[in-house]
Amino acid sequence: MRIAVIGAGLMGPAIASDCIECTEVEQILLIDIDEDRLDAAARKLGNPEKLEVLVGDVRDRQKMVSALKGCDVACIALPRWLNVEAVWDAIEAGVSAVDLSGPPRKDWVSIDKAAKDAGVTIMPGCGVEPGLTDLLAAYGMDMLDRVEAVEIWCGGIPQDPKPPLNYKIVFGGRYLPLRPGMVKVIEDEEVREVKRYTHAGFIEFEGIDKTLECFYDGFPETLYELEKFKDVKRCSEKTVRYPGYSEKVRFLEECGLLSREPIEFEGRKIIPFEVFSRIIYPKVKLEKGEKDITVLRVMVEGVKDSKKTRYRFDMVDFYDEEKGFTSMARTTGYTAAIIARMVGRGEIVERGLVPPVRVIRGDLFLRLMGELRERRVSVKQVVTTSSTL
């Protein structure tokens, strides 16, 4: 099997590492626009024989198509504003692809049609969130006769929080993942909108000695792929951070520093968020030696065998001291690598744009979780039932 990994930043090397260790993968092609970043990734991976590196820009369609031809599957590990270019590169090359995030919703229909015409599979959301969160929710829903609520919490946090935000960038390049606006929740069987950075309570995880906070972040609409989801009365997704984060972000938003709309400053047009990002980046960059934690909780409630039943899935994952990978890279990259090999083996036969919850169910889902467990990425399941005596 020949696998391409597009992007050699925080996530790509973890995907490549997992594929290098897999005997059924004969060659890994690691592509990035930055030659220095490629060299650093190759050194980190030990420069194995099966690794090939290529300097390439996903916006150079001709070069990317030529490079991808002959690959069985491509893994896209790029910032959101570039991943759609890589998706189109893969489709034109006739290569299936798994994407850590996913193209904008407005592009789904055209990508689905083009992928079907090309006879390839494009799988968006194959990381942790989106990815594991959706799949765990689907698994819990499959176990119930009727589903009433789906609640998701997920976040990447530094082990040693430092001001000003007690947060460090663990994905997405040089930009903080700050996207002000409204997000959807389901309450009392109705879809409603709330402001993204509305404080949504506190949460605790086993193995973390600090109470954490969360804010609303919009539930995964791929859950609409599941028939049982239509009966859900309550659903939300929340991002987890250290206490005080959402209040600070709301302050920045109110000051206008997160705006993407240009303003005039001393005769020039500037974008406030770009200026803010340049200033804040040195303070939120994950420096060498700094470590992170990834937390995840999914709760699915409903009825099974006439009893109120709740499935709760918890994951607390730490920085990999042995390999030097961040927890976010491990949990995200390994998930994508495992799914990519499922596609490469032909175990996923549906063509077009295919959300993972549609096809990674039953035995495939259990195998995914088993392979993650072998890599010390473990999800704890707790089942609670209640009935009237």
Image: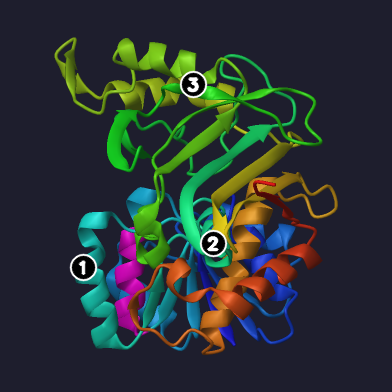
Helix, strand or loop for disc 2: helix
Q: Which residue is mark 2?
A: 135
Which sits in the foreground, 129 or 74?
Answer: 129
Local crowd size for mark 1, using a 10 Å CA cut-off: few (<14), some (14–19), many (≥20): few
In the rendered image, residue 75, in percent from the top left (x then y), is placed at 50, 69
Against 255, residue 321 (above or below) is: below
Local crowd size for mark 2, using a 10 Å CA cut-off: few (<14), some (14–19), many (≥20): many
In the rendered image, residue 146, in percent from the top left (x then y), is placed at 48, 59
Q: CA distance from mark 2 to mark 1?
A: 22 Å
**Can you see residue 100?**
no
Residue 339's image quarter?
A: bottom right
For the view shown, which residue lies furthest in the front direction? 389
Q: Which residue is mark 1?
A: 109
Against 133, residue 253 (above or below) is: above
Q: Is residue 84 magenta?
A: yes
- For the record, the magenta segment spans 83-94
**Can you see residue 209?**
yes
Which sits in the foreground, 285 or 53?
Answer: 285
For the point 73% across and 57% down, the residue is 44
Amino acid, disc 1: Val
The reply to whether callout 2 and callout 3 are in contact (CB within 8 Å) is no
Q: Which residue is mark 3?
A: 280
Q: Main secondary structure of the magenta part?
A: helix
The reply to whether callout 1 and callout 3 are in contact (CB within 8 Å) is no
For the point 70% across and 74% down, the residue is 20
Amino acid, disc 2: Leu
For the point 39% across and 84% down, the residue is 350
User: Marks 2 and 3: which is nearer the front?
Assistant: 2
Amino acid, disc 3: Ile
The reply to whether callout 2 and callout 1 are in contact (CB within 8 Å) is no
Q: CA distance from mark 1 to mark 3?
A: 37 Å
